[in-house]
Image: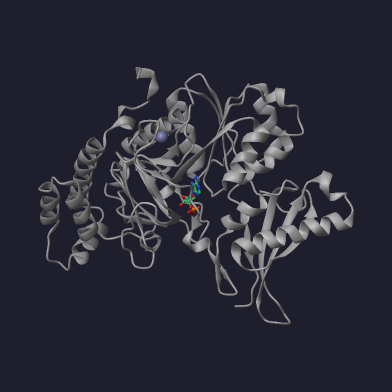
Amino acid sequence: MTKKDFYSKAEFFTPDEIFDIQKQRFINILNIIKNTKFSNFYQQKILQHNQNKLTLDNVIAKFNNCNDKADFYNLFNQLIPFTTKQDLRENYPDKLCCFDKKNYVRLHCSSGTTGNPTAIFYTKADLDKWADLMARSLFVAGVRPDDVFQNMSGYGLFTGGLGIHQGAEKLGCLTIPAGAGNSKRQIKLLQDFGVTVIHILPSYALHIAEIISEYKKHQFSNLRIAIVGAEPYSEESRQRIQNALGVKVFNNFGLSEMNGPGVGIECQQQNGIHIWEDSFIAEIINPQTCEILPNGEIGELVLTTLTREGMPILRYRTRDLTKILGNDCPCGRNHLRIDRILGRSDDMFIVRGVNIFPMQIENILMNFQQISNNYVIMLQTNPQSNLDDLHIKVEIKNEFFSEDIRQLQNLQKAIESALHDEILVRPIIELVQHNSLPKSDGKVKRVIDLRQK
Ligand code: ADP
Ligand code: ZN
C-alpha cells in the first residue's frame, strides 16, 4: 500500500490496535467526566447506575486494569448506563457541557425530525477532530484534494451543511456551499464549475436525478461521486441515483449527537458503512430488553463518543435500526461495518396489527420502472369499517401516465399485490401525475398519519 491509499493511518488499525485506542480514549473521557465542574450529568448517572457502590475513581480503575477485550466490553455494558434522546432534551440546552462556556466555538442542533431538537456544543479541538473524520470519510469514498465538491444540503443548525463542508475543505477540495433546494441553480453550479463530487440527501437526489436525466448526460461528465446520507434509502434508490447521475453513491452516516456526518461511510466496496471505531464505540441492542445483540441481528445502534472533550455522550441510543455485518472487508479496513439504516424505531408504524417500516415500501415501489421517484404514505381510519387503511400515493413517470386506463389499472394492481406480499397488508394505491406530490429540500416526511387516535 502506498501512502496515498489512506487519509489517516487509523483507517488500517488492526482489531487489537482499535481496542487499545478505544480503551485509552474511553478512560480519557471518563476522566473528563470525573474532573468537570460544569456538568454533573454523567457523574450522577454513572453513580446511580452502579447503586452508589462505586466511585468514578473505582470505575476508572476497573477499566484501567482490564486488558482483555471481551472483559472490557462486558465491563462497559455493566458499568456504563445508556443515554437517551429524552436525557438530552431534559438537559437542554447545555447541561452536558464539561467545560466553561468560553471554551466552545460552535453549536449545532439536531434537525428535530422526531420532536424537540437537542443542542451539541463543540470546542475548537472537537471541530478539528470532526473535520478530520469527515475528510477521512470523503477520502475513503474516493474524494481527492483536486475534486470540486458541491454541498447540496442545508447550512445553518443542521450538521449536514457545515459538517460536510469543513471535511471537504480540510481534504483540500474546492468546496461550493450550495445549500439545499433551487434545482436550477444547483444544476448551473454543477455545470459552471465542473463539479466532480456532490453531497446530497437521498430524497433530493431522487428529485434532482429526474431533472438531470432530462439534460444530456455529457453535460455532467465531470460528476463521479455522490455522498448520500442523513435519511434512509433503499438499494433500489441508490441504483436509480447512480444511473441517473452517472456517479457512484456512497452511504454516509452520522447524527448530531455524535458530531454530525463523519461517524462512518461506505468504502469502495459499497457493502455497508464502516463506523470509525477509533472515535466511537458502536453496539447493537435489542430496543426492548437493551441486551447486546450478536452480529447479524437487527437492533438499535448505540454509540459512544471517544474523542469529543466538550460534550462527551456515552452509550447513546440512536433509535436507528441496523445490524453489524462484520469487521473485515475486502478493502482491508477492520472498522466494523453496519448495514444501511433500515429506519428509526419510531418510524415504524402499525397497520391492522402489522409492523411496517417505510423502507419496506420504498424497496418494492422503486422496483417498478413506471414509478417516478416520489411517493407518500398516508394512514387513515376507514369511516365504514373503523379499521386502518394504508393509502399510498405514487407518482408515475410522464411517459407511462398517458397510457390507456386498463394499463394503469393493471399497474395499480401489480403494485398492490407486490406490496401485499411484502408487508401482508393490502394497500390502496393511487397513481398520481409526475411532480404532483410535495417535495422537500431537507429531510422528507414520507408518512402522514391521519388516523383518529
Ligand atoms: P434528527 O434526529 O432530528 O433528524 P440529525 O440531523 O442529527 O437529527 O439526524 C441524524 C439521523 O439521521 C440519524 O439518527 C439517522 O436516523 C438519520 N441518518 C443519518 N445518516 C443516515 C444514513 N446514511 N442512512 C439512514 N439514515 C441516516
Ligand atoms: Zn471496506
Foreground pick, 335 / 9: 335
Measuring 61% from the left and 26% from the top, which residue is drawn there?
A: 223
Residue 129 in view here: yes
Measuring 64% from the left and 54% from the top, which residue is drawn there?
A: 364
Q: Position of residue 27 (x, y in %)?
A: 18, 46
Q: How many marks?
A: 0
Instruction: Give above or below for 140 relative to 22.
Output: above
272 left or right of 284?
A: right
Residue 36 in view here: no
State which quarter of the image contains the C terminus: bottom right
Instruction: Give above or below for 334 relative to 292.
Output: above
411 left or right of 308?
A: right
In the picture, residue 445 is in which quadrant? Answer: bottom right
Foreground pick, 169 / 123: 169
Q: Position of residue 419 (x, y in %)?
A: 65, 60
* Ligand 2 sits in quadrant: top left
Q: Position of residue 52 (x, y in %)?
A: 15, 66
Foreground pick, 372 / 45: 372
Q: Position of residue 372 (x, y in %)?
A: 73, 47
